[in-house]
Amino acid sequence: MNISILGLNDNRYIRPLQLIGNLFFEECSVKLDKHEGADVVISFHYEVSEEINMSVQLTTSEEEVYTANYRKNLKAFETEKEFFNQLKYAASHVYLTVLQDWTGIVQKWGILTGIRPTKLYHRHMMSGSSKEDAHQALKKDYLISDEKINLMEKIVARQLTAIPDLYDLKKEVSIYIGIPFCPTKCAYCTFPAYAIGGKQGRVDSFLAGLHYEIRHMGEWLKENDIKVTTVYYGGGTPTSITAEEMDLLYEEMYESFPDVSHIREITVEAGRPDTITADKLNVLKKWNIDRISINPQSYTQETLKAIGRHHTVEETIDKFHLARSMGMNNINMDLIIGLPNEGTTEFAHSLNETKQLLPESLTVHTLSFKRASEMTKNRQKYKVADREEAERMMNMAEEWTADHHYEPYYLYRQKNILGNLENVGYALPKQESLYNIMIMEEMQTIIGIGCGAASKFIHPETGKITHFANPKDPKSYNESFVEYTDKKIAMLNELFNIEAKSI
């Protein structure tokens, strides 16, 4: 779909209009001029006084015409960027409205294309808004459907039950530890993940750097009396390394981090069942780690083969029972909606198999075509569900989780997600992942340690977020972990010194 935009002459409009166009059309091109070959011309007109008055007219190649209008009071602004953002927002509002009218497709998430919609609801709660006022504001300002706002409301309520002091944890930090190795790389994956086979030298070098980061970050935390709320081992697959390597790593954590016994939650992703052994589970128990993920993604063997996961369905079930028998009492499992050649029949089968296990939490992902993944690069090879079937599968997940007493507790979205849907974490009462809540709602600084680990430094007063990422490949990480550790500590010093001066 080639869209010609008239009346907006600032290139900063292109990205938001492109993202909204992508919600409606698989391949969408947006240009800020009238050009040959345009399938549709969309003309904008706006006036600014005490309010922004934005109107738009869409004209198809068949001379069909659709219009939309939007008025909003102009808020006070200090910079040109703040003024432009208000114009951009108004343009997005009429643009989405006219595309919905033309295509007949209603976007339940409205103009939102970002990852964390529940942050908007939290802002209303922190400002003292009632639930009713928050609901109406989100519906009016962002065109979000009642259905999705109700989901946001449930999730925020669940989060505040799980972490009553969620808004008061800015002086603590959480820690993400990235281990970039997997048995194989899945076709949909873009995480830092490298096949571990034959790479022991690289693994040894990486672990030496990881121990260094943990030790020096722990020293900084202790020296500055900074508490740790949660720790999350991700990747890759953290259980790809040996039991002996895991044991030494957790020992380092206990020696280095402050007051580990009072950290609220420590999670280890054991996502690939083919990496789980009794020896590794014994190591987890030794260090009092009982929250793990064992991720089937699907219970159809042909699907696992198609996406590059070399474990069997039976292995997933066997490893779950092994973990349960060894005292693991907080297990998460992941399912993915829209995997190749899967529809409602296959997804119903996966839900039925999940019923036999009943993990403490279930995360239902919707397939996202990530730019650098194998699946996106060779998209013609993979037949996936259409928008309507993806939505039916999401509805099945909502009904199944409600029937089995799971409640939604966190949510995030991704670019190019199938059916413009979402990823939702469900949990039994008091079994929510606290780290997932912290990372999604961005209420405190997250320190990233390890290969490809991303840090988010969140200013405790302004909420301004500064991103900093370690190198994604083990070779670059091994060459620079000292430098990157020093940089993060310098950024943390600045962040917490600012906080100290403001008190």
Image: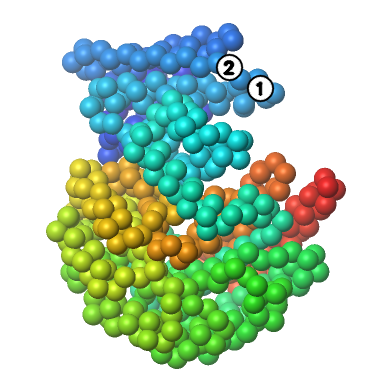
Estimate the x, y position of residue 303 in percent, counting from the top left.
Answer: 21, 66
Query: Which residue is the site of mark 2?
Result: 74
Image point (32%, 34%), residue name: 107
The spot of residue 50 in percent (x, y) is: 59, 10
Q: Nearer the viewer, residue 410 or 476?
A: 410
Q: Which of the pair 379/299 is nearer the observer? A: 299
How far is disc 2 from disc 1 in space, using C-alphas? 9 Å
Which residue of the protein is positioned furthest toward the left in this rendering?
Answer: 345
User: In the rendering, at what x and y percent does residue 266 appear?
Assistant: 55, 72
Residue at image location 44% in from the left, 11% down from the top: 45
Which amino acid is tagged 2?
Leu
Q: How many marks?
A: 2
* x then y, percent, for residue 137: 48, 28
Callout 1: few (<14), some (14-19), or many (20+) C-alpha neighbours within 10 Å? few
- Figure colour scheme: rainbow
Query: Which quadrant of the structure image shows residue 271?
Result: bottom left
Q: Mark 2: which secondary structure?
A: loop
Label 2, residues with CA under 10 Å away: few <14, some 14-19, many ≥20: some
Q: Is residue 46 visible?
A: yes
Where 2 falls versus 461 (above or below)?
above
Which residue in the protein does label 1 denote?
77
**Is residue 444 toward the left or the right of residue 319 in the image?**
right
Asked whether the beta carbons under mark 2 and mark 1 sit within 8 Å of each other, the answer is yes
